[in-house]
Amino acid sequence: MQYGSTRTPDHRVPLSTALQRGLAPDGGLYVPEQFPSFRPRDFAGHDTVEAVAERLLRPFLGEGLLADHLSAICAATYGFPVPLRPLGRATSVLELFHGPTAAFKDVGARFLADSLARLNDEADQPLTILVATSGDTGAAVAAAFWKKPNVEVVVLYPKGKVSDRQEKQLTGWDTNVQTVSVRGTFDDCQALVKEAFQNERWQSQKRLSSANSINIGRLLPQMTYYAHASLQHWRAHGTRPNVIVPSGNLGNGLACLYARACGLPIGAVVFATNENRPVTHFLDTGAYEAFDSKETLATAMDVGDPSNMERLRHHWPSADALREAITAVRVTDDDIRRQIRRGPEAWDTVWDPHTACAVAAREQLDPDDAHDWILVGTAHPAKFPDVVEPLVGHAVEVPDPLAEVMARSHSVPEISPTLDALGKAVGDPARIP
Ligand SMILES: *Cc1c(COP(=O)(O)O)cnc(C)c1O
């Protein structure tokens, strides 16, 4: 399989190149050239998510080093469960928050980290991954690359602009992962990363790469939990469940559509968004418009101009085509609060603000719809105690992996947002375990 750019379809590269570049040279996003065609029975005997992942991803890898190591890469990606938990009322929740940073981004980040480490195994210089984060992505990337050989990571976050708990997750790393607190905004952090990429001295001294969410190496592995969950449902009921995905930058929802395009037994796909409107507005009007991002309770979905829109519109070029592929439901902060408050009684569950968007969408769509629904649980509620605890009236227990990261939290260098300061803080590139 080759990967084309959304902007220059006949610029084709193998997966290894797409992973290492992140973005295509023309600024486009890499997309698979075609989708393999599976039937549920092709997965007979593949019961674990690791085994399903290996079967599903095989055709996406082509030949070469990644294909040779696919089994080990899938094992490294998971190592934690992704259970489909029945809730009653024809609804289950796919819990994607049992990984090290308690959110679904662990899956994509771990696949990418393991793949990049293997691709750089023989290189004489480590790969340096630069990440600017407003919270969750940086923690997932740091956790995924921690102690991987021949890769180093520098995480930049805006000082005072992430929650206490997020800060603890960003600063619980050492050896090959360095975190730097930047006196500035998230945009300053992102600008600094861009500047490093364009700086000749940085380019000549380090082999820079990124691990942001537009990398196809984070999207592909996200198909695998949809495959595993839908097969589980298919085997038990013989029907295709509908899936509701809390969505912001649209990577997770797109992965669900990719899984369905490969023939996995998935019915309707619903993108649950918060008050940010780019998707619902596009489906309503047929004209794409980027918005400024709006702050909501589901912060990781506060995206006004989602980068994966470019992939969606590549695969489903018209608004009509996209309307056939997905439904989108917009959820307000009031809806989120309401669902978190009534979660323990209505569903016997404490929801995080992002998963609560899927719950709200489920109730808005048609409460009596006879289809089976899978709500995608993107984060553990303990990540957002300030929002969740007052609404449910008690403390939420922190899951062990997350507690371990936070317990390792230590002070990190604080810099002004300049490349010089960053260079001094991260020092010599060859500090690899
Ligand atoms: C990133 C994130 C989302 C949004 O996922 P996209 O792939 O950007 O649409 C939803 N929930 C949580 C908890 C997240 O961290």
Image: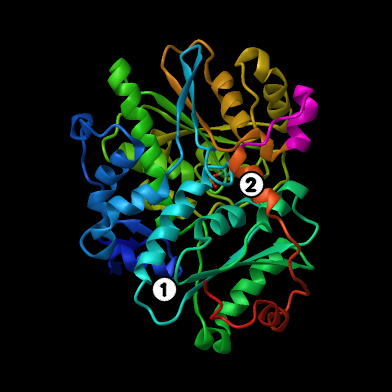
Residue 378 in the figure: left or right of residue 243: right
Residue 317 shows up from this direction: no
Please provide percent x and percent y for residue 242. Answer: 41, 25
Q: Between 231 and 139, which is closer to the camera in this rendering?
A: 139
Kind of residue sitting beneath label 1: Pro
Region in magenta: 385-399
Residue carrying label 1: 25
Q: Is residue 302 above or below residue 200?
A: above
Indicate whether 232 appears above or below 78.
above
Name the residue type under label 2.
Answer: Glu
Quarter of the image where one finds residue 378? top right
Q: Residue at x 69, y 49 (%)?
A: 406
Question: Is 3 left, or right, of 412 in this rendering?
Answer: left
Query: Percent from the top left, x then y, of residue 25?
Result: 41, 73
Expressed as whole percent of the image width and height from the top left, the position of residue 149 reads 45, 68
Residue tagged 2: 404
Q: Does 344 sit above or below residue 279? A: above
Label 2 or label 1, whichever comes before in sequence order: 1
246 inside magenta stretch: no
Q: In the image shown, does 247 or 229 lie closer to the viewer? A: 229
Report the residue at 28% width, 21% height from top.
Answer: 235
Secondary structure of the residue carrying tag 2 is helix
**Residue 130 — which label?**
none
Mark 2 is surrounded, within 10 Å at the Cα level, by few (under 14), some (14 to 19) or many (20 or more) other residues, namely: some
